[in-house]
Image (cartoon, rainbow, N blue to C red):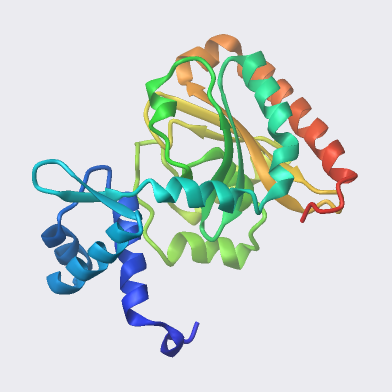
């Protein structure tokens, strides 16, 4: 993309929003300035403007910044633009009640999975800590989307950027994923086996529209030991049934992408 078409101040503002999103704790002006190499005065002006619009808010004694509540409002409206996923909500909710675990519906957004819908299952601190955006390489839904990449795209994804190893099980290189890719295509199910976080397992299957195009994915997430007790074969069977029923509905829905 031609950077001459960028507005520098807006570009810096989006960098600040992104770093606040990625950070689990509130950040001060000096910390943001140092992390992004943006002058403190610029960070100060941007944050004051965002505060006026409710995009950030101050917390704690030091008045450090976190994302504001307006992002919740805008996020809900943005999700409505992907109307196809709402057709699977009822089935995802039914699946969650049936298996007692958290069920998510997500779509590919740039190099991440954007969670459009989530129905929590039995209590789990692990699942409650998950972000609404997940990396492709260490999430079950992400792996579903990666299997659709051309070999050159897949190679570039793994080799042209850094992928932190979140646990000892995390796959971070092209050759290792190539082996798993064949298993995913053959089985139709992708797994995150404690690759995102220790103690957490997730399985996912792709959702296709009436033209056979991959438009999203549905997943089941929960504590590894609890899911092992319930049986992964059983969970796979129930997930496939829910996805198949969702695809049947999408087949007759003209607005699906």
Decide if residue 51 is on the left or right side of residue 113.
left
Residue 102: x and y in percent read: 55, 25
Residue 218: x and y in percent read: 65, 36
Q: Is residue 150 above or below residue 227?
A: below
Residue 110: x and y in percent read: 54, 61
Is residue 102 visible in this depiction of the protein?
yes
Residue 190: x and y in percent read: 61, 37
For residue 238, which quarter of the picture? top right
Which residue of the protein is positioned furthest toward the bottom in this rendering? 4
Residue at point 46%, 14% (across, down): 225
Decide if residue 181 is on the left or right side of residue 57.
right
For residue 129, which quarter of the picture? top left
Q: In which quarter of the image is the C terminus?
A: bottom right
Residue at point 34%, 54% (across, down): 54
- How many discs mark residues in the rendered view? 0
Decide if residue 28 is on the left or right side of residue 157.
left
Residue at point 16%, 66% (across, down): 33
Residue at point 50%, 62% (across, down): 157
Residue nearest the viewer, comparing 153 with 176: 153
Which residue of the protein is positioned furthest toward the top in this rendering? 229
Is residue 135 visible in this depiction of the protein?
no
Residue nearest the viewer, comparing 124 with 203: 124
Decide if residue 161 is on the left or right side of residue 251.
left
Q: Is residue 21 above or below residue 17?
A: above
Q: In this view, does 188 lie above or below 38?
A: above
Q: In this view, does 81 lie above or below 104?
A: below
Which residue of the protein is positioned furthest toward the front in this rendering? 52
């Amino acid at each position: 993309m031609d950077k001459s078409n960028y507005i520098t101040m807006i570009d810096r503002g989006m960098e600040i929003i992104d770093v606040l999103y990625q950070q689990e704790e509130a950040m001060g002006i000096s910390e943001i300035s140092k992390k992004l190499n943006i002058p403190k005065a610029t960070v100060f002006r941007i944050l004051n403007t965002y505060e006026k619009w409710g995009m950030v808010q101050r917390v704690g004694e030091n008045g450090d910044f976190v994302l504001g509540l307006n992002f919740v409002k805008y996020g809900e409206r943005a999700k409505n633009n992907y109307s196809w996923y709402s057709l699977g909500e009822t089935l995802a909710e039914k699946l969650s009640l049936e298996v007692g675990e958290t069920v998510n519906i997500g779509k590919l957004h740039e190099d991440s999975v954007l969670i459009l819908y989530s129905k929590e299952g039995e209590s789990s601190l692990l699942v409650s800590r998950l972000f609404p955006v997940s990396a492709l390489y260490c999430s079950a839904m992400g792996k579903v989307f990666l299997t659709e990449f051309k070999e050159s795209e897949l190679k570039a994804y793994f080799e042209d950027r850094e992928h932190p190893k979140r646990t000892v099980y995390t796959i971070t290189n092209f050759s290792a994923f190539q082996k798993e890719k064949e298993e995913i295509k053959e089985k139709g199910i992708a797994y995150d086996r404690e690759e995102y976080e220790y103690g957490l397992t997730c399985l996912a299957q792709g959702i296709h529209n009436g033209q056979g195009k991959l438009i999203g994915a549905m997943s089941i997430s929960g504590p590894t030991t609890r899911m092992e007790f319930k049986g992964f074969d059983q969970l796979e069977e129930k997930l496939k049934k829910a996805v198949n029923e969702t695809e049947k509905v999408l087949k007759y829905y003209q607005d699906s992408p």
